[in-house]
Amino acid sequence: MIENAQILLIDDDESSQSLRTVLAFLGESIIASTSADWKIQAQESGLNSSQFSAAIVANCSGKGLAPLIQELHTWNGGLPFILVGEQHLLEELDSKFCSAITAQLPAQLSYQPLLDALHKAKVSHEHYNRLRNFDGVRDFTMFRSLVGESDALQKVRYMMGQVACKEVSVLITGESGTGKEVVARNLHLNSNRSEKPFIPINCGAIPRELLESELFGHEKGAFTGAIASRAGRFELADGGTLFLDEIGDMPLSMQVKLLRVLQERSFERVGGVNTLQTDVRILAATHKDLEKMIELGEFRQDFYYRINVFPIEMPSLRERPEDIPLLLNELIAIMESEKRGSIRFNSAAINSLCNYEWPGNVRELANLIERMAILHPHGIVGVENLPEKFRKYLDEKAASPLGSIGLDASTDASVVPLQKHSVQGGAAVLDSGSPLLPLNGIDLKEYLSNLEKDLIEKALSDSSGVVARAADRLQLGRTTLVEKMRKYNLQKSQESESQPSSEEGVAASDTAGKNKSASV
């Protein structure tokens, strides 16, 4: 996450302290303000606008929500918004402001939706900062649909940012289901042609004898059944982008005709004599190895070099298992927003999914989520609930892919440690894997108190009872940790020990007392 990133909390109900208390407990740095003085508070903090990773707006009753969001967007164009409570945007609010709203949460906050919203906002802000120096990128939220933080996906984002505004052909390769069309659409939306049509055509789904008519159109009477003239995809995409999906399935005879169109930027309809001019950008995609097809004589080399000006290779899902938890959250959020149900996965199920080979890639993962939401509506899916082919790794001693992808205590304390110790893939769990988040909700205050107590006990245990070390692990002051230990009565067993004079002796005697009890 971005260093020293702050959250701007705008809450017109100054008597309400619950939201800022929860955010402080989660380890977030916040600047609290109202809709009237948020800019003053931000300036007095000494931070510039780019150091704010999100704005949380709750109980907005001043100038109105829409004007406030417009002001914030002008102040920081990449600032994502999280709305809390029943707030309705005005109809005249521009779509670009609406796209910056990453989450809308109810006034009665639940732990997991809040954590998901914070994480999504920070990821969106990171993408904005990463791309702001790319020349010509028009919309810094362009990659929100490309979910993941793996190195392979970061490389794809970088290449997209470099070529989005360039007038060159792009060839997107990768296995089926990796998101090649998502890349093509994002490239179009961030090009100078974004106001013009994006026209896709699947070259493998159309019979060979009809493909020419689909691409170039036909005149009335050109062939049996042509009862009227019809414009082709090149005409429909004029001024915009033509996406040729599965171009490896295009017959050789059509490759020759298409090559001429790309060279001369002109064509004739089937059965027509008039030459039509075309101005389109070509984006192509395929899951096949075109170079091998060229060697076999199944694909034209000159056509290949014409479309392969700038190649982008999409990584398979098995090459980026660290992205699976993020993809789960995103796909579940999309399903919930479309009112198609909901589901959660516990840590054991996520471990199993991270070790699966995923021949169908992201498309297969989305289909699995849909299936689980139907079979276990609003439930928590464990390994035993997964289809048999996904239950490959049931041994808890097996190496967990989550450990190798950075989900450990050394990562950003504001998001990941809580996700590991209490939340995995949308399901709240402890290290034992037992569910903590009932379907009918929880008492957030009690839940957070218990969580804090559990983490303090675990830190003390991992530090052999040395309070100073435990405080370092929790990123707390030593005296603050001692006060919290007293708050949760973690020193009861220490009072009967012989060395309560120092903090380290107190914690050590507590550990000794626990070991003694365990041995009894």
Image (cartoon, rainbow, N blue to C red):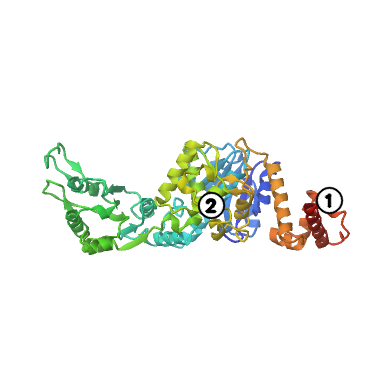
Q: Would you name the residue on which mark 1 appears?
A: 492
Q: Residue at x 71, y 57 (%)?
A: 459
Residue located 80% across and 58% down the image: 512
Name the secondary structure under disc 1: helix
On the image, numbered disc 2 is attached to which residue? 351
Q: Nearer the viewer, residue 15 or 153?
A: 153
**Where 204 falls versus 129 (above or below)?**
above
Q: Can residue 71 be seen in this view?
A: no
| Image coordinates for residue 216, horizontal then vertical, percent | 19, 48
Q: Can residue 146 be seen in this view?
A: yes
Q: In which quarter of the image is the N terminus?
A: bottom right
Please tell me which of labels 2 and 1 falls first in the chain.
Answer: 2
- Within 10 Å of disc 1 (Cα), the crowding (few <14, some 14-19, many 20+) is few
Label 2 or label 1, whichever lies nearer to me, is 2
Kind of residue indicated by mark 2: Asn
At 51% from the left and 51% from the top, the residue drawn is 352
